[in-house]
Image: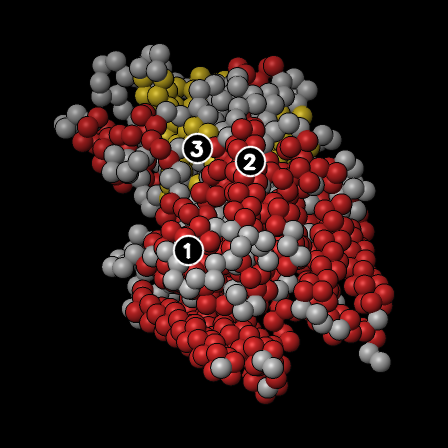
Amino acid sequence: MLPFSNIYFTFLAAALLRIVLFFYGLWQDAYSPIKYTDIDYFVFTDAARFVSRNLSPYDRDTYRYTPLLAWFLLPATWSKLWFSWGKAVFATGDIIAGWLILLVLRFSSGMSKERALKLASIWLLNPMVAVISTRGSSEGLLGVMVVALLWAVTRKKIKLAGILLGLAVHFKIYPFIYAISILWWLDQDRVGDSSPQSTNTETTISGNIIKFFNPARRTLAITSFSTFAALNLLMFSIYGRPFVQHTYLHHVTRIDHRHNFSPYNTLLYLSSSPSGDSVLRLESIAFIPQLFLSAIAIPLALAKKDLASTLLAQTFAFVTFNKVCTSQYFLWYIVLLPFYIPKSSFVARPAMGICAAFSWVLGQAWWLQQGYRLEFLGESTFVPGLWLSSIFFFLMNVWILGTIVTDVSQSAARNIWKKVP
Amino acid sequence: MSRITHSLGVNPPLQFSRSVCIEGSPRTAHIFYPAKKHFAKSFIRLPLISERFSSSSASQYHQPLTSLGELTTYIQQKICPSSDSACHDRALSLLSASYLDIDYDTISHSLVLNAFWERAPDLGMWDDVFEIVGGNDKVEVGVLANDNPTEPEQLKLGGWLTVVGEDEKPSPTLFSFPSRHHASSPPSISTFSVSFVYPTGLHPTLRIQFPSPSQNLPPGEACALHAYLTLPSYLFADKYQLSDLLFLKSKGLKGLRGLYGETDLEAPDWVIEKWGSSMLVEIDTPGGDQSSAAATGSWTADIPLHFRYLAPKSGGGATDVEVPWPVVFWACRAEEGSKMSVNPFDRVNLGYDGLFGPKTMFYQLSPQPANSSGLLLETVGVPVLDLDKSRTVEIGTVTAIVLGFVWVCWKLWLAGTGSMETREVKKDRRE
């Protein structure tokens, strides 16, 4: 019997992994000039320190998050012993996210305990995930929110789902793409509404519209929007314009000229500089393919077939087509991988899976090597090195995305086949 | 005695770095650099701790300057009478000055030029002729040498003074005065040199090297070694990186004592309006740890810096930038701070002097340039995007994005129609 089929063993191992990394981090920070702790964690805790002195967290340069995060990290400012409070919370968040993944797999997808545990281990026992959260990156926190949102939706806890969605969007904007797929998914058949269903196939347009806005959809829209609005109003009333500027507007006005994995990167460096003479002003229309795919096309085409895998496809599309892309963004979709893996043709056809994994790693390695030559050796690897490797990485991700799309639609089709008597 | 990379009024320290540094009102300096766009906007502000010494200037500007030629031409054409060849010559002689301080007094509306030549303009003996041309001019020539002062904060000078055209013969003189600035003694071995750790990449490390700990002894008990850096806009220091004690210690630093001006951690160079930033760091001296000090011949302090992204350009993927050497000095607590305000010879508003309290004395270490030019500048290549290679970037990126977008749309279309087919199959089966 494989060890991770035991629920206690899996969670114990996940906890132990994080505890070991947590203390290793404390040791490295104490004795090495090179820190284990993520730079962002210093940003959060500095911001929390400002809050503890009744100042704005935005007094800390590069703090681009909701003040909630700084409030949440206030205990880290109490004493030296409490400094790592945030890391402990983030790591605990990981475990809770893993637990919720398990619940969704077990009770919404009706999977056996062993299989569900194996899949949840992709998140729980993933060393990359454990390292990121114990280094003090807050991305894992978003993972909990997203999986909790999925759990609430699949368990028909619509109000809770709305609150979680509003909170997640307030936290990091991008989860707004989930709103469309969840709304689309919550149709009459799914919610099991008690209102008399029309047997007439030729309903009027207005009737269809009324039917579309069923109570579940209305509740989700109202709760999520009011949570989002309430949080923003609260933060705006306390911190004013810097809150809006750093949490939201910054993402609109930033130039993203520094090298990152995004295919747009070299072009943005070129066009944002005085020597750039771009005709297209591509950076201002880059959001069109990204949002069309992640917020409209993918939700409408796939959400009703498999909500969890649709969320994965959306996130994958959002990250792949984004104007800026760094490795923390990968965490956004890793948390949703366990829901897709069972129907993935990358698993069904191992050769293809290995090929995809290999290309992904190759794309990363190629880019990182070029990045190293630029940052530390001072070689101008912008073109062709960094540019070509980011284009390769992009095309490879597009291929994976296309496969995910096909897998999700076909698995739904297969399910229908199975259900047919 | 005082060293700078920049200073008061309009102050081009020619010998130390080929750059101009201006402290004071942007309007005063404007006549010398009228071509500069947004000139007034590019000044940075420095705090003043000892206001007595840096009375008026909390604004600072710095710019690399290849020669004082423009200024001497300006003086020759606008200030010197056209017939006065002596005035023309004197203006021209500024080209070889070690430093030139220009001070404009707003109360008396007078412009004061202070030039200093470290050695004779021509090789060999110092041979100069002074004559009075105008009726109201007064020229005083003094030949003075350093004498042993009776108090540590004093400078004592002895020699002869002559007022040209009035005195028949030079009159002997001996006077002393307290001074904020001193040369670290003995000057011949109280030295440092500066280089970059190669490869520099986008995160260059500026290394200050000292010959040996036994030679660089602090001049007093309450002294701390400091480096004052002038960082043009393409360079910046990260104050958050410089806050961890273990990290600082590994670099041979005690701490960041001040960082002023343009400190944005993310902006590229082309959006920066100000000229750059000034930085004061305290250097860790190996004095406390005798065993390790004795083991190594020389010791270093490493200052971690970062380059901003520079604009892409054609013809090679690197842009050479010049980085001025820092000023390195011991800052010591003086016994009698109040006395020092009376010294008329002290240069003030040097950038760092205002950052220390009034009871501070500065003992300067002398820079030892490795290159023959004697310029205290390091030239570093910053990697940039090569425009010659990037012609295909736009079309290539657009093609890739469109291809990727169309491919995913196609897959989604297939998914949509495919499910319709299955629905139909389902219907068929039911029928």
Residue beneath disc 1: A208
Farthest-out residue, left: B83
Amino acid type assigned to the residue bearing label 1 in the image: Asn
Of helix, strand and loop, which one carries label 2? helix
Q: Quadrant of residue B273?
A: top left
Residue beneath disc 2: A230
> Do marks 3 and 2 share a chain?
no
User: In terms of sequence position, does the residue under pointer 2 or pointer 1 come before the other?
Assistant: 1
Crowding at dot 3, Cα within 10 Å, few <14 / some 14-19 / many 20+, comes out as: many
Residue A25 or residue A229, whichever sits in front: A229
Q: Position of residue A203 (x, y in %)?
A: 39, 58
Residue A64 or residue B156, whichever sits in front: A64
Q: Residue at x 43, y 33 (%)?
A: B44
Work out how far the residue at label 2 is from the one at label 1, CA to CA, in angstroms: 31 Å
On what subunit does the disc labeled 1 rest?
A
Amino acid type assigned to the residue bearing label 3 in the image: Ile
Relative side of A382 to B154, left or right: left
Residue A288 in view of the camera: yes
Q: Is A158 located above or below residue B3 in the figure? A: below
Of helix, strand and loop, which one carries label 3? strand
Work out how far the residue at label 3 is from the one at label 2, CA to CA, in angstroms: 40 Å
Work out how far the residue at label 1 is from the one at label 3, CA to CA, in angstroms: 64 Å
Q: Which labelled disc corresponds to residue B44?
A: 3
